[in-house]
Image (cartoon, rainbow, N blue to C red):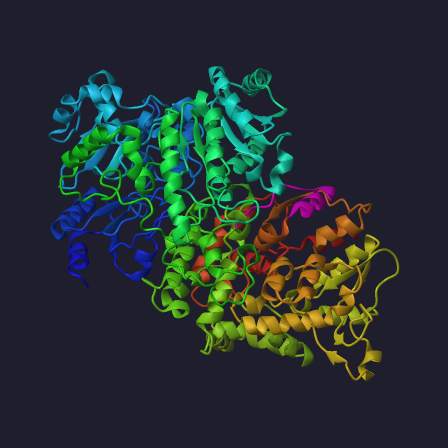
Amino acid sequence: MTDLEAALRRAVRGEVGFDVTSRALTTMDASNYRRVPLGVVAPRDADDVAAVLEVCREHGVPVVARGGGTSIAGQATGTGVVLDFTRHMNRLVGLDPEARTAVVQPGLVLDRLQDAAAPHGLRFGPDPSTHSRCTLGGMIGNNSCGSHSVAWGTTADSVRELSVLTARGRRLRLGREWAGAPEGLRDLVDGDLARLRTGFPDLPRRISGYALDALLPERGADVARSFCGSEGTLGVLTEAVVRLVESPRARALAVLGYADEAGAAQAAAGLLPLGPLTVEGMAVDLVPVSAAALLPRGGAWLFVETGGASAAEARARAEAVVRAADVVDALVVTDPAGQRALWRIREDASGTATRMPDGAEAWPGWEDCAVPPARLGAYLRDFRGLLSAHDLRGIPYGHFGDGCIHVRIDFDLLTDAGVARFRRFSEELADLVVAHGGSLSGEHGDGQARAELLPRMYGAETVALFERAKAVWDPDDLLNPGMLVRPAPLDANLRFSVLPRQPVDVEFGYPSDGGDFSAAVRRCVGVAKCRTTSVPGGGVMCPSFRATGEEEHSTRGRARLLHEMLAGELVTDGWRSTEVRDALDLCLSCKGCRSDCPVGVDMATYKAEFLHHHYAGRRRPAAHYAMGWLPVWLRWAARLRAARVVNALASAGPLAAVAKRLGGIAGEREVPRLARETFSRWWRGRGGRPSEGGDLVVLWPDTFTEHLLPSVGRAAVRVLEAAGLRVALPPTLRGRAVIGDGTSRSALALPTARRGRVCCGLTYVSTGQLDRARAVMRRTLDLMAPVLETSAPVVVLEPSCAAALRTDLPELLHDDPRAARLASRVLTFAEALERHAPDWTPPAVNLPAVGQTHCHQHAVLGDTADRRLRASAGLTGELSGGCCGLAGNFGFESGHYEVSAACAEDQLLPAVREAPEDAVVLADGFSCRTQLEQLAGVRGRHLAEVLAQGLE
């Protein structure tokens, strides 16, 4: 233990982390930069903060304050001690509806404040797109803004008083009329009044540099306002009094379509006199194909929100905006759900923009320059020209009404030549912004990305004044050194420089990343949507973070550890790393991040890849053998007709406990009972051949349907045949061309015939046994060869198996063209009915439905067809999001029970408890049904079972 670590442990009551994991999780924020800290402290209160500052001052170690870690300019990274305010100093201390103020701690997430203020008709005005995970302390440090700044301004406009600790331990209460000003600050201002009155651009989004002009006497000498945007370089915030604004009772959203972004930019300033709440812009490049149908015609759009005392008033104002705008097309939405869906497109742009349409990587660095709104159109044309001159691409979007543009650019930050071009472009763009009367930063601060270029905006004398102000507040340069004044070069400390230059030898194909595992890991840019504590709209990501609240159990945290594993500086033992293994241990492999992460991080695949290498040549945990090889054990039980014996043993308490302990299964879990008759045996008993009639569909006998709950398969057969389809099962013999009888006794005489069972390989993939998974998948492709010669779809009832066939199969067998062909044939139960029996009318169940969309279905398969099928059957209500928490083998593994149960309590179990008594509990996944039965005593049913019962 170092002297510094020992001193901190003695001095503070909060957690002190100098271990590899704690440091690795804070090497980066959402920027291009990386710094390795000495340690991380999670202070419990202001006294802890003071103690940290005293110890670090004695040891000459810098201190960096960190909130949600979503800064995009590098200011939330450092080489000394990082203060993590999200763990303990995250409370809403008080809220006064009459005074319209709130007292907050720096680690409070913005959405928690909004939730508390909403019942009083109030809200905090600024709302960055990261509102579900950014903290008030970070917002004050960066002077954040958000989409509603045209109505309610920046964070500085919403700050009343700030409680601050200086680097030398002074406790200050900052406010107007020099309240809390450190000694020497007033003299500094009085000595340079002319410069402060003339040297700062008059912009709604001027965030760059220190806001020393807020200290002018005619502006109330507001020390708190001046502190905003100082990026943790002047003092450490411990508490804030912030102003709340009245939230309109009703809102409407006018989406205005324009031919291109230039047209949208030119129109934005002209809408401001109408008093909108937002004027946001984005172009078609950033709109996912799945969301395009939600938007009116056009190549670019303005999102103009209006408010009113009633829905009619809000709509009237939105329609007035449409009439005043010269648009290609327009849409006015008053439905809150519809507005949320549209805003989600805009908010996800910060992640979507990290990939060009052709898949090339794009990076921040010039994310949020701002110019006068009236000059935005001209600036964008010049900006596009500069991009072309440097052979670069970027997709602008952002706060058009404030003249603030976000953009990620496809810089090559992996080679010396590319980094040199990054520098040249940055210098020329800084000059271009200044030529248009703008600010280098319009929202996220300067950090390392832009501080070096501040002399181009302010001139050398004003920057020297900034340095003198820093010395007044922090004479020892202890707080976040290298930011704003005396900055590090903008092309130093790039986080990519430590990654391997050659592709890493891996098993999956990573088709979206050119087969490069490093590129896959680089996808995580720190947007941190995985750190949200709620998942509106049926989302899934990230259930383990919501259960534990720990960064290492978020998708971002795991990606950071994988990044450090590849870097080899902090995590030095590569694939054998215990730190990475432990962080991935609580990943449920729910695949939620594959769809919900704006940049498409796929942690389930990365986990499988890691486990494969980590245990290569070594004994695995018992659960990998017990549950990874589950299809084998169940197949043997069926061959030996041992279901009754196995069930009896599982019911015998002492024997079951021993078996679970040996198999690495949680003692709290009940072992599911085996069916006495497998689905395939039932199929053979009814003749084993397709019925006559319509389209042929091949019904996949997944392991869970086959051995554990064949009633689902029987129900599916009944419904599919009632819909006029011919149902067959996959072949079980190689070297034959007959499809669907399940036995083909006549083929036994063929010399090439070999008996086998199809399997998606899911259990082997989820436990990282990729060699075995590949062998199982190849055998499956051999068996499915006759099916692939036909046009028959493959209907898979278990969503996790369908997802494995759609994604894991072609990505693991990327060298076998048959894998992609089989993946393209896979349909869910609802998709099969919709596509192959479009004229069939399902039975009228006419009951409320409750339950959860399977996480793999949400992430990979989609549930649009299921929604339509439920509606046709009269099943009303929305299914919840999240993950059930069992997630295949995860919830059964020893040590996972508490997290598994917490995940179920997040959304699924509360939804079931609150459901009407006559509600149908839908759960298409075997894991979901098992979790419901074991934790709530409720029987969930597959949609096929519900419809089959309706046919009766």
Q: Quadrant of residue 190?
A: top left
**At 45% from the left edge and 20% from the top edge, which residue is drawn?**
374
Q: As drawn, which residue projects farthest toward the front?
A: 389
- Residue 307 lies, in percent from the top left, at 50, 21
In percent of width and height, residue 633 lies at 60, 76
Q: Tell me if 56 is positioned left or right of 25 in this view.
A: left
Task: Give the left or right position of residue 405, taking residue 855 as reference.
Answer: left
142 left or right, relative to 629: left
Give the image location of residue 410, x and y in percent. Answer: 47, 45
Residue ranking furthest to the right: 692
Asked if residue 623 is among those painted magenta in the image, a careful observer would answer no
**Left or right of residue 314: residue 69:** left
Residue sitting nearer the eye, 404 or 757: 404
On the image, the x and y values in percent for residue 632 come to 61, 76
**Location of the N terminus (image quadrant):** bottom left
- Read off the magenta span: 863-884
Number of numbered discs present?
0
Is residue 864 in the magenta section?
yes
| Quadrant of the rendered image containing residue 873 | top right
Q: Is residue 433 visible?
A: yes
Residue 92 appearing in the image: no
Q: Nearer the viewer, residue 668 or 221?
A: 221
